[in-house]
Image (spheres, helix red, strand yellow):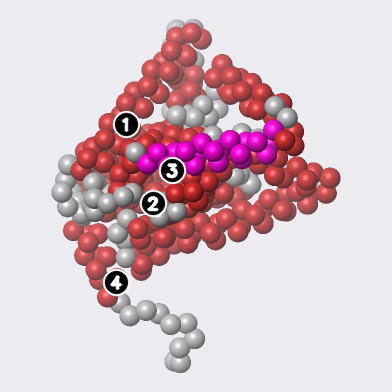
Amino acid sequence: PPLWATLTQFLVPAGEQTFFLALWLLNLVSLVAFFFLLQRVLERYGFGGPLAAAVTTAFLLVNAPLLRTLVYVQVNLHTLNLILLAVLFYPRRPFLSALMLALAVNLKGSPLVLVLAFLLERDWRWLAWFGISAAVVAGLTLVTDGIGPFQDVLRNWQGLALSNNTIYHDTSFDSFVRSAAQFLPLGPAWTRGLIYAAKALLAAAALWAVGRSARSLQFFGAPQPGSQLLNSIPALYVLMTLSAPVVWEHHGIFLALPFLLMLKRLERPGEWLWFAFAYLLEFLLPTFDFFPWSFGRLAAPMLILWLMWRDAEHKRESPVFSGLNRWLSKLPPVRLGAAT
């Protein structure tokens, strides 16, 4: 969507270096904001303050998608921060929550999938605010630049859907099927059909996981306003990320919440092993182009989705998580500047 270009076009006359520096500094601000927002969201899901801070710190210290987001000066952090704000504002401030998600959708497009989580809440006032906010934000581009940028977006999406490019660090279903098709006697029509079928299966699996999580209150156990949202949105992050026509390595940062929330649920050694393997593939391995091993970042979110589905009927949190959460919460606070 053209919102980011609309907001930053006034920097173009300043030259490429100034433009780059401004966007780089904005990313650094977003990185700091992301640390605190992710920590607050984890606290809302039941992580104690010390554990939320420790998990967030460990997650950011070594993180290949985050590094790529910063190096490529992408809008991922801005988009993800807006999504986290939408979750934090809900349900007490529905207008601000809806506005934050509307801004995220106008920055990236794929967060539109997350509206399904709010549909489960049946909060028609929120949905109305979202529709109005999304239209007003899109209207900013219409007023300044007309309909042309939106037509360009549609043409770009059509071009991506019909593309035959094979780029191994594009870990979308589109790229994987096109890459595999090089070794099989498949024409373009069959290739596109397999891509659509794979995404349909992904959507069915994600929505099934959403239903199980919402019904069992998997991640947020208190049945109160907002609980359906909090329980359903982790699986929708996976659908949001993998349903896109291109999934670059930096898009993995959108999977932060579903990965970290699974720490609440893992009990058996086998579950920890699968989680560690998926985490390694998604966040720790560097980017490389070698078929089929490059597509580990396609397998990792599906492993997490499978773990969500498998765990949804368990009625308790992980004993490791509960014990560590209680122990860290009892530690005395660290006071900076205290006398030694």
| First-in-chain label (2 vs 1) | 2
Could you say whether the residue bearing mark 4 is in a helix, strand or loop?
A: helix
Residue at figure coordinates x 70%, y 44% from the top left: 7
Q: In the image, residue 189 lies at what x, y percent?
A: 48, 8
**Residue annotated with mark 1:** 207
Q: Amino acid at mark 3?
A: Trp
Q: In this picture, is 245 found above or below 238?
A: above
Label 4: how many residues lie within 10 Å, few (<14), some (14-19) or many (20+)?
Answer: some
**Residue annotated with mark 2:** 91
Residue 328 sits in quarter: bottom left
Q: In this picture, is 7 found above or below 194?
A: below
Stretch in magenta: 123-142
Q: Nearer the viewer, mark 4 or mark 2?
A: 2
CA–CA distance in space, label 3 to label 2: 9 Å
Q: Amino acid at mark 2?
A: Pro
Q: In this picture, is 132 found above or below 193?
A: below
Q: In the image, residue 140 lies at what x, y percent?
A: 68, 39
CA–CA distance in space, label 4 to label 2: 27 Å
- Which label was assigned to residue 126? 3
Label 3: how many residues lie within 10 Å, few (<14), some (14-19) or many (20+)?
Answer: many
Residues at discs 1 and 3 in contact (Cβ within 8 Å): no
